[in-house]
Amino acid sequence: MLLLAAIFLLTACTPPLYKQQAYVFGTLVEITTHGAPEASARPAVDAVLREFDRMHRTLHPWEPGPMETVNAAIARGEKRIPLPPGIAPLLRDAARLSALSDGLFNPAIGNLVRLWGFHTDAFAARLPDPAAVARLVRARPAMADLKIDDDALASANPAVRIDLGGYAKGYALDQAAAILKQHGIANALINIGGNVMALGSKGGTPWRVGIQHPRRAGALAMLELQDGEAIGTSGDYQRFFELDARRYSHLIDPRNGQPVATMQAVTVLTRGAAAGVRSDVASKPLFVAGPGGWREMAQRLGVTEALAVEADGKIRVTRALAARLTWPEPKTPVDIID
């Protein structure tokens, strides 16, 4: 959904960096370890990528697989729908976070995503049928419509279609960190299409990443990530189409069924337990809340470090995050807010 550039400064005496890339979750995944020989790093990274592939096949809402089967059963109104092992806790957590965000983070609106064409990588520049959008908005699909047991669910609303795309990458970051640690890897940078988590450091130096500028190539700002920190961005600049001089992005406001047009990007920084999930999820409701609501939503979600680029290009950043950022263009106009 976004791009952050990880910058690696190498010298001849640097201990070994091992890097591996793959394409999972519809995006480029890159894992870099530091200080471990390839004989140790490779099996650890291979284990992470195998888990990513398993998650992709299990959670994908559109390709044939367990989640697509669940969604089809919801649409048919089945009373008890079996869940793949391990999925119930993810759905309960996603429902909790959705409620915390007043529904602005809403993984139940997969049918709206599909109407707008953003369920595939080859989406077209076309507008959906307004009546179909209006019907789905009136149906108000929500995670609260799900009754979730340990191995099954039921939905009171057949309009629900579960799309965990705004949750899965963050969850994958947390899983990757756990797997790497189990393999004895203490220093790594995990990048899933711009959702990034740092483990340890790069030879005593923090991992340095760039926050993608939403309207041109290169970094808007630079940030040094400490051990266990994660960063997530939601932006309108990667999955979008333009029609009649207007940009339509994949980030849809569940309240009106329309792509959000008031923001260019939101970035959040998190740490601690489930930092990956929280970084991935939190950026979405902040983006949807828009210029007048993102700061209040950040406070509601316990996010103190956030940066927002509004539709007119105005940059606002919380004081806590501003203290951590450096700007490639020193005269970048920025509003710092408490």
Image (cartoon, helix red, strand yellow):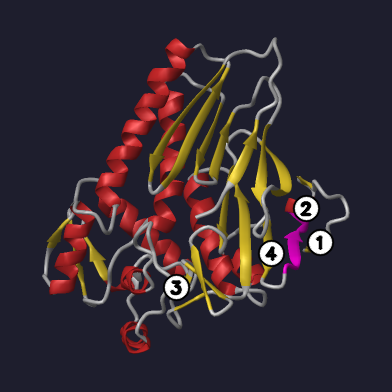
Q: Residue at x 41, y 42 (%)?
A: 172
Spatial CA distance of label 3 from label 4 is 22 Å
Q: Is-magenta flag for residue 140?
A: no
Residue occupying the point 38% across, 47% down: 25
Pointer 3 or 4: first along the chain: 3
Within-10-Å neighbours for mark 4: few <14, some 14–19, many 20+: many
Q: Label 1 to label 3, Cα distance in Å?
A: 29 Å
> Callout 2, which amino acid?
Ala
Closer to viewer: mark 2 or mark 1: 1
Ranked by sequence position, the earlier of labels 1 and 4 is: 4
Image location of residue 109, percent across then percent down:
35, 71
Residue 27 lies, with reference to residue 80, above or below; the image says: above
Which residue extends farthest right? 331
What's the residue type where badge 1 is placed? Val
**Residue type beneath disc 4:** Val
Q: Is any part of residue 150 visible from this angle?
A: no
Q: Is residue 316 magenta?
A: yes
Circles 2 and 3: CB atoms closer than 8 Å: no
Q: Which residues are magenta?
A: 313-320
**Which residue has dot 4 on it?**
309
Q: Which mark is residue 103?
A: 3
